Amino acid sequence: MPHRPLPDVRDRADLDLLLRRFYGAAFADPRIGPFFTEIAGTDLAVHLPRITDFWERALFRSAEYRRNAFAPHAALHSVRPLTAADAGRWVQLWRAAVDGLHSGPNAERAKAVGERIALTLHKRLAGADAPLTGTGPGFVPLAALELRSAA
């Protein structure tokens, strides 16, 4: 039986499903899950519409998002530092969620935007000169993402 390609990310409904898949994995992840569950106490019912607005704006320019996306991450970082390894794990889970449901130009853009967000947050939180390396299971070296984005 021939393999049918996955559909691209088309609209808010696709983003909602994608984000639910991602947060299901992220909440359960031993490395980054505690940031969501223990430190932030993220209520997905409240967070999901906001983060869907963010991604709808980032991918389609079709939603209003006027929140400060950096502030909650800075608050988390003040309680428990977000490391390069944490950002790398976030990227890995995000890419897996996208790849598990979608393929196409918007899916590729979603992965690229996620990588840029991880790099930017890491540099703002840890300092521009902070190392982009780390170790541990599932670690995606941020230095590799930085090199890929420069190419």
Image: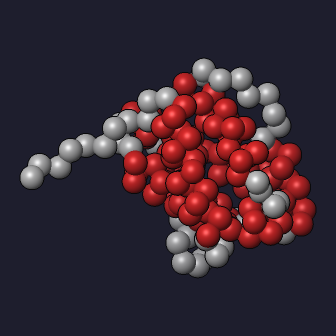
Q: Find the residue positioned furthest to the left.
A: 1
- In the displayed structure, would residue 119 be above or below residue 85? above
- In the displayed structure, would residue 143 be above or below residue 61? below
User: Which one is in front, 35 or 146?
Assistant: 35
**Res. 5 image quadrant:** top left
Instruction: Indicate the position of residue 61 as horizontal and vertical percent values.
Output: 60, 22
Instruction: Indicate the position of residue 42 as horizontal and vertical percent values.
Output: 77, 56
- In the displayed structure, would residue 44 be above or below residue 108? below
User: Which one is in front, 64 or 131?
Assistant: 64
Q: Find the residue positioned furthest to the bottom.
A: 136
**Res. 58 image quadrant:** top right
Instruction: Indicate the position of residue 14 as horizontal and vertical percent values.
Output: 48, 37
Name the colouring of the figure. secondary structure
Taking the spot 53% from the left edge, 60% from the top edge, the residue there is 93
Q: Is residue 43 left or right of residue 55?
A: right
Whether residue 12 can be seen here: yes
Whether residue 141 can be seen here: no
Taking the spot 88% from the left edge, 55% from the top edge, the residue there is 75
Taking the spot 76% from the left edge, 45% from the top edge, the residue there is 46
Q: Is residue 129 left or right of residue 13?
A: right
Number of marks in picture: 0
- In the displayed structure, would residue 55 be above or below residue 42? above
User: Which one is in front, 58 or 100?
Assistant: 100
Q: Find the residue positioned furthest to the top.
A: 62
Taking the spot 46% from the left edge, 49% from the top edge, the residue there is 98
Instruction: Indicate the position of residue 108 as horizontal and vertical percent values.
Output: 43, 40
